[in-house]
């Protein structure tokens, strides 16, 4: 976590007399500037050991319940691994991340005070080499030519690693500033190193904020591949439509949470704030 914080007050509607929201941002102004202009921000430690244990257990339980007996999750050469979606709806342990100040405060600092969140996971497995993803980015709605009043769909992912991110488990690579290259395109099935890429190796409980247009990839696991469990905590303005995660479970756990939720929780679940 950041050892420094600062306070930011937002007046909704642009008037000093409008309702104010105060945010204690868990970062420095310089770190926020780096996130905005370079597209990423590294955190060596986001989770306490106790939280890390709880989230590992929850991921393992959901993964076991959804794992197909006839799949080893390594056949897809572009995005291997097991993916879990809509985790707030699948295990109460994940609710700890719903209003998690070290991440949501940074999201509010760059996206505005009213944000929604969603949570997914990717697992790659021990003893399996070459588990990787292609170079990709997450927001794919920027047209060419660019309309003069086009609104860029800014959003933010926090990739939180529940296991050590090493050369054996598969580090993550990213290209600083690539979220600003709106006219550039990525090739099909691109696994090649980029001349200006940054490769991150992090301890369990650490993570990285990335703008959702940033070029990034999970690199191949090594000859002695170890378990790699990653959570992807995504933030966007509460009025932005989410399209990547498919249909939520019909009887998801957040329905019960919403019965007594305050306004802030309702915003974070995407049902208020607009």
Image (cartoon, rainbow, N blue to C red):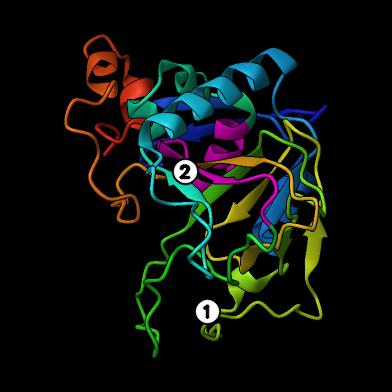
Above or below 18: residue 213: below
Residue 108 in magenta?
A: yes
Residue under label 1, please give it.
182
Q: Residue at x 43, y 51 (%)?
A: 71
Q: Residue at x 81, y 48 (%)?
A: 166
Q: Position of residue 190 (x, y in %)?
A: 60, 80
Q: Residue at x 70, y 63 (%)?
A: 220
Whichever of callouts 1 and 2 sits on the residue coming sooner in the sequence is 1
Q: Position of residue 78 (x, y in %)?
A: 52, 70
Q: Position of residue 189 (x, y in %)?
A: 54, 80
Q: Secondary structure at mark 1?
A: loop
Q: Secondary structure at mark 2?
A: strand
Q: Is residue 202 visible?
A: yes
What is the CA distance from the residue labelled 1 to the residue labelled 2? Answer: 20 Å
Residue extending furthest toward the bottom: 145
Residue extending furthest toward the front: 70
29 vs 163, nearest the viewer: 163
* Residue density around tag 1, few if under 14, some if 14–19, many if 20 or more, within 10 Å: few
Q: Residue at x 61, y 38 (%)?
A: 106
Above or below 25: residue 29: below
Residue under label 2, please give it.
235
Using the rendered view, name the quadrant where residue 107 is placed: top right
The magenta segment is: 103-128
Q: Position of residue 57 (x, y in %)?
A: 56, 20
Q: Is residue 18 visible?
A: no
């Amino acid at each position: 976590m950041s050892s420094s914080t600062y306070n930011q007050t937002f007046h909704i509607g642009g008037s000093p007399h409008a309702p104010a929201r105060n945010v204690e941002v868990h970062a420095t102004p310089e770190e926020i500037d780096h996130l905005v202009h370079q597209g990423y921000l590294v955190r060596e430690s986001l989770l306490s050991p106790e939280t890390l244990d709880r989230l590992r257990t929850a991921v393992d339980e959901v993964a076991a319940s959804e794992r197909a007996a006839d799949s080893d999750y390594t056949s897809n050469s572009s995005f291997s691994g097991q993916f879990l979606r809509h985790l707030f709806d699948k295990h109460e342990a994940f609710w700890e991340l719903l209003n998690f100040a070290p991440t949501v405060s940074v999201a509010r600092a760059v996206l505005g005070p009213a944000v929604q969140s969603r949570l997914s996971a990717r697992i790659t497995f021990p003893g399996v080499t070459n588990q990787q993803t292609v170079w990709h980015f997450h927001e794919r709605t920027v047209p060419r030519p660019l309309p003069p009043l086009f609104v860029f769909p800014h959003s933010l992912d926090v990739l939180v690693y529940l296991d050590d991110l090493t050369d054996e488990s598969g580090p993550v690579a990213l290209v600083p500033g690539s979220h600003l290259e709106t006219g550039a395109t990525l090739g099909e099935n691109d696994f090649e190193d980029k001349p200006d890429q940054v490769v991150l190796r992090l301890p369990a409980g650490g993570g990285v904020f990335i703008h959702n247009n940033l070029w990034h990839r999970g690199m191949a696991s090594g000859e002695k591949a170890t378990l790699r469990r990653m959570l992807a905590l995504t933030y966007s303005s509460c009025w932005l439509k989410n399209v990547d995660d498919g249909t939520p479970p019909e009887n998801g756990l957040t329905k019960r949470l919403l019965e007594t939720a305050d306004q802030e929780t309702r915003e974070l679940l995407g049902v208020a704030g607009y």
